[in-house]
Image (tube, grey):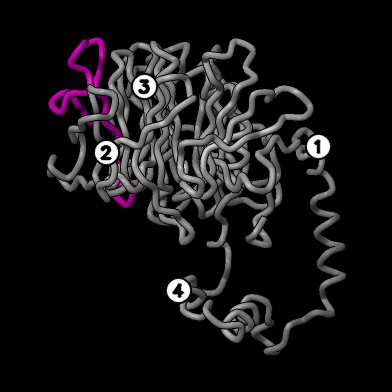
Amino acid sequence: MSNRFSGLLFVLCLTACQETARYTTAPFDSRLEKEGTMHGYAQYEWELTHDPATGDIPVQRLAKAQKILLQRTSGLSTRSAFWKPLGPADIGGRTRALLIDANDPTGNTVYAGSTSGGLFRSRAFKSPSNAWEKVSGIDENLSISAIVQDPNNPDLIYVGSGEGWGSANDVRGAGVWRSTDGGKNWLQLDKNFDPAFWHVLDIDVDLNGNLYVSTRYSGIQRSTGRGDHWTPILGDFMGNGNTNAGGDLEIGPDGSIYATLNLYGPGKIFKSDYTINKQNTGDPNTWVEITPPGNYWRIELAVAPSDPQRIYALCASSDLQVNDMWRSESGGQNWTKMTIPSLTALVTMPFTASAAWFALIARVDPNDANTLYIGGIDLVRTDDGGNTWTHLSSEYPFPPEY
């Protein structure tokens, strides 16, 4: 958990700004139908920029609009001054997975997973040069979506592939890869040639060394043999409206396991309590639903490393925004609603805008259960358990590419 948090701000910043194409006013489907030709692109751009009242593109208003925008954003520039790019530059692409290698006590060895460019490693992450190298033994163009290290055996590293949050530019993966020698050599697990493992959304290892993956089309799966054999533990076989669209995975400091299911509704949170189930934690018959009240789609979780009873849940609804955020101080038995930060001082919509289906993550400070970082389009922090928020970035949703 601490290794994940150490790279938190890097991951949140990169993840938060990935997909904002839904800000366009033209219908998304019409764009897809036209994008094969230059004429189609020109038509699409006209739909975005013309004035419906006149039928023309008002280029004469550009200078005035730029002046107004500069005036409105002048007070926000200091937030971006604290950030600098850390790589992998250019060829790395969008980064969704980050791991600080526990085998390196200096914290200089870091793995970064690209959504379409494979796995990268830096052995001098803290140095000014911060050089990166492609990790050999893993497909060059593989989409890396998640990475985890066994907490009891840091030579065991697992990489999940295939971005599966529903973006038009998702790249199909090839299951799970495993290294048993600290990242020197990698093996693609045979089972994962199955299409059910083409989109691994999250991956984690519990205190007993069991491996868990959340998949787009085959629910939550567990392996008690380092990924050689798999058993479905949460999915449509449960009935009650559950689907095989997995979501988030979190393992608390006490060994309890949390998982979310049904990305496109009805979103639910499940818990397998270690204090009750001990060595059987994670078995199919040990899961209890602890979802707070509401009708949700995607749900993102965070568990405090310093307090196993403290859980946070960011709940997106069918309008693709985060409309409810919850805090539990009882391991999910009771929930308290938190305030939702806005996107920026200029835009009153939630911090995810309409991209909560894609850009959503949360992590708790390892030493303070009240300090929570959440990322959407903007990165924000609370130091009082979700009552007040501080913006750490100022992303503006237009134009949609940035």
Amino acid at circle 1: Ala
Dots 4, 2 in contact, CB < 8 A: no
The residue singled out by tag 2 in the image is 190
Spatial CA distance of label 3 from label 1 is 34 Å
Q: Element under label 1? A: loop
The residue singled out by tag 1 in the image is 81
Q: Nearer the viewer, residue 45 or 79?
A: 45
- Residue 280 x/y as whole percent: 18, 16
Q: How many marks?
A: 4
- Residue 62 x/y as whole percent: 82, 72
The residue singled out by tag 3 in the image is 251
Amino acid at circle 3: Ile
Q: Would you call the spot at circle 4 few (<14 residues within 10 Å), some (14-19), or many (20 or more)? A: few
Q: Which residues are magenta?
A: 262-289
Amino acid at circle 2: Asp
Dots 3, 1 in contact, CB < 8 A: no
Marks 3 and 1, the one that precedes in the sequence: 1
Check residue 29 in the rendering and tell me which mark sits there, or answer none.
Answer: 4
Marks 2 and 1, the one that precedes in the sequence: 1
- Residue 318 x/y as whole percent: 38, 55
Q: Nearer the viewer, residue 54 or 242?
A: 242
Spatial CA distance of label 2 from label 1 is 46 Å
Q: Would you call the spot at circle 3 few (<14 residues within 10 Å), some (14-19), or many (20 or more)? A: many
